[in-house]
Image: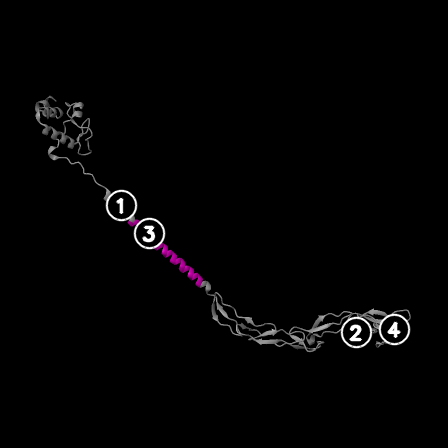
Amino acid sequence: MRRNKRDNQCGAHKFLGSKMECCDVCPKGKYMESECQGSAKTKCRTCEHEHFMDKANFLSACLPCTVCQEDQNLVTDTECKADQNRRCKCKEGFYCTDIECHHCRPATLCGPGSGVKEKPTAISDTQCERCPPGTFSDVTDFLTPCLNHTNCLGKELEKAGTPEANAQCKDTTSCKCILSISLGVGFAVILIVILATIFFFYWRTRRHSKMTVKLLQVKPEPLPLAHPDTELQYPTLCHDEKYSQNHCSSAVPIGHCMEMSDIECDCVAMSTLGLTQDLDKSVVGGGATGNHDSSSRYQSEPQENEWSET
């Protein structure tokens, strides 16, 4: 490898060659294979695999890429390229102690009651803090911050939270809700039964009152009573063959027949009461005319000599 040769006379991006000529330098990612000579310019070549050159140069070879040692808790951050060296970093849980990150140190762990305020970076350690009221951390790591306690909204708080533990809740709301619904339904059913019973008795009482009023408003009419002293003494009068239909019709007033107490003739039924009234009228009238009418309307009972003829 040749040393850099520069002369203020050559200017930027040039170097003074062995022949005392100003030659062009090679760009990054390449190295110088040969100097310029006369009209021939500097000859450059690209860096080989696992080699790099990250600056303009007139070196005769590229630099080897860095290897990330796993036993040093290093992992590859960026791969090696012709114009860039491989960059390493510490694996998770470790941080670098120098800018070049040649060595790694384990990150600090935050225990229960303390949360991670700042996570570890490639070049810095973890920053922990004590969990403030209403928060907790029940793990030991370098990632988890303090978390809020569980809000037992709609549930029953069984155990209050601490900086080291979360709050514990009882899931009893569903049971209370079912009990409340059951009580409400039962109360509604009982209320409906009571109202139905009251309505039934009210309807029954009102119906009985209406029936009583109707019965009290009925005015029974007096039944016609027969007079025993004026009852017809010869009920077979009309059935005698000697009396014609016309005679019976003239003797019995029309429209005075009754079901049980009436006297039924072959022509028209005559009520006892009507016959009695006619007899009373004939007696009260007296005189020849009255006697004549009575004898013509009411015939006497046949005599024994007349019975023999039959």
- For residue 182, say whether it is visible: yes
Q: Residues within 10 Å of mark 1 (few under 14, many from 20)?
A: few
Callout 4, which amino acid?
A: Cys
Q: Residues within 10 Å of mark 4 (few under 14, many from 20)?
A: many
Numbered tag placed on residue 143 in the rendering: none
Q: Are marks 4 and 2 in contact (CB under 8 Å)?
A: no
- For residue 141, say whether it is visible: no
The span shown in magenta is 176-205
Of labels 4 and 2, earlier in sequence is 4
Q: Are marks 2 and 3 in contact (CB under 8 Å)?
A: no
Asked whether, in this view, residue 95 is left or right of residue 163, the answer is: right
What is the C-alpha distance between the residues marked 2 and 3? Answer: 107 Å
Numbered tag placed on residue 211 in the rendering: 1
Instruction: Confirm whether the magenta stretch covers residue 202.
Output: yes
Numbered tag placed on residue 22 in the rendering: 4
Q: Secondary structure at mark 1?
A: helix
Asked whether, in this view, residue 76 is left or right of residue 2, the answer is: left
What is the C-alpha distance between the residues marked 3 and 1? Answer: 18 Å
Q: Secondary structure at mark 2?
A: strand
Callout 1, which amino acid?
A: Met
Of labels 2 and 3, earlier in sequence is 2
Residue placed most toward the observer, 111 or 206: 206
What is the C-alpha distance between the residues marked 1 and 4? Answer: 140 Å
Dividing the image into 4 quarters, which one contains the N terminus? bottom right
Instruction: Confirm whether the magenta stretch covers residue 193.
Output: yes
Callout 2, which amino acid?
A: Leu
Asked whether, in this view, residue 227 is left or right of residue 64, the answer is: left
